[in-house]
Amino acid sequence: MAESVIFTLIFGALVVSIVYFFNLTWLDPRFILIVLFLLILPGLYAAFTSGPFVPSARKRHRTMLKIAELSPQDTVYDLGCGDGRLVFASAPHVKKAIGYELSIPLYLFGKLVSIFKSKKAYIRFGNIWKQDYKDADVIFCYLLPNAMKQFYKEVWPKLTPGTRVISNAFQMHDLKPDKQEDKVYLYIA
Ligand SMILES: C[S@@+](CC[C@H](N)C(=O)[O-])C[C@H]1O[C@@H](n2cnc3c(N)ncnc32)[C@H](O)[C@@H]1O
């Protein structure tokens, strides 16, 4: 959620500067506030329903990548990719790495960074619960326990057998992990 506040402040300051610089004083400030609110709304929804943006710590990222045993044939998804750091770290080692993100500021940031990163890294705007993961070899999650429960109910049964799901910090409902290291859990579908 912090990223939404920072985005609102920066974007707001930018808009106010433009308004005064170009003498657009006829522009109603309430209109600007409504636009800003609409821009941060999807991110707020994502934060409250499945998890706010808290990037996995560097050490955890390393453990997640290690436990995933990525190979050049793998298609990797990060469910709620935040600023995309896990997508960018995975991309050089796999066929493609895709991150879905619902927060507009984070999505725009990740998309911008992706220009300078591996061509195999894709940052997409979208709701993680509305996507198809049939081609996934690896799925990374760092989501709240209730979201992991939803994952277990809605996504897990549809995965192709052999898909490796790596969850940071939270276990997948009652399922016993196939491997565990430093609060990173591996489940093989
Ligand atoms: C805890 S962060 C994890 C970030 C990243 N995966 C990592 O490990 O560093 C969770 C992210 O999921 C996003 N998110 C939550 N619900 C989502 C949804 N339904 N669709 C897309 N993204 C969502 C949030 O906006 C947030 O950026």
Image (tube, rainbow, N blue to C red):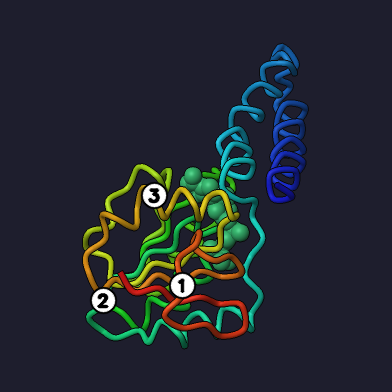
**94 on left or right of 85:** left
Q: Residue at x 67, y 60 (%)?
A: 54
Q: Which mark is residue 95?
A: 2
Badge 1 vs badge 3, beta-carbon distance below 8 Å: no
Could you tell me how far apart the alpha carbons at marks 3 and 2 are, in whole angstroms? 28 Å
Could you tell me how far apart the alpha carbons at marks 1 and 2 are, in whole angstroms? 29 Å
The first of marks 1 and 3 along the sequence is 3
Q: Secondary structure at mark 3?
A: helix
Q: Position of residue 153 (x, y in %)?
A: 39, 49
Name the foreground residue: 22 vs 98.
98
Indicate the quadrant of ligand 1 in the picture: bottom right
Can residue 83 be seen in the rendering of this structure? no
Q: Which mark is residue 176?
A: 1
Give the quarter of the image for residue 99.
bottom left
User: Quick one: label 2, few (<14), some, or many (20+) residues within 10 Å?
Assistant: some
**102 on left or right of 53:** left
Q: Nearer the viewer, mark 3 or mark 2?
A: 3
For label 3, the residue is 153
Q: Position of residue 108 (x, y in %)?
A: 52, 50
Q: Position of residue 82 (x, y in %)?
A: 56, 58
Q: Secondary structure at mark 1?
A: loop
Q: Secondary structure at mark 2?
A: loop
Can residue 160 be seen in the rendering of this structure? yes
Badge 1 vs badge 2, beta-carbon distance below 8 Å: no
Quadrant of the drawing holding the C terminus:
bottom left
* Kind of residue at badge 1: Lys
Name the foreground residue: 14 vs 88.
88
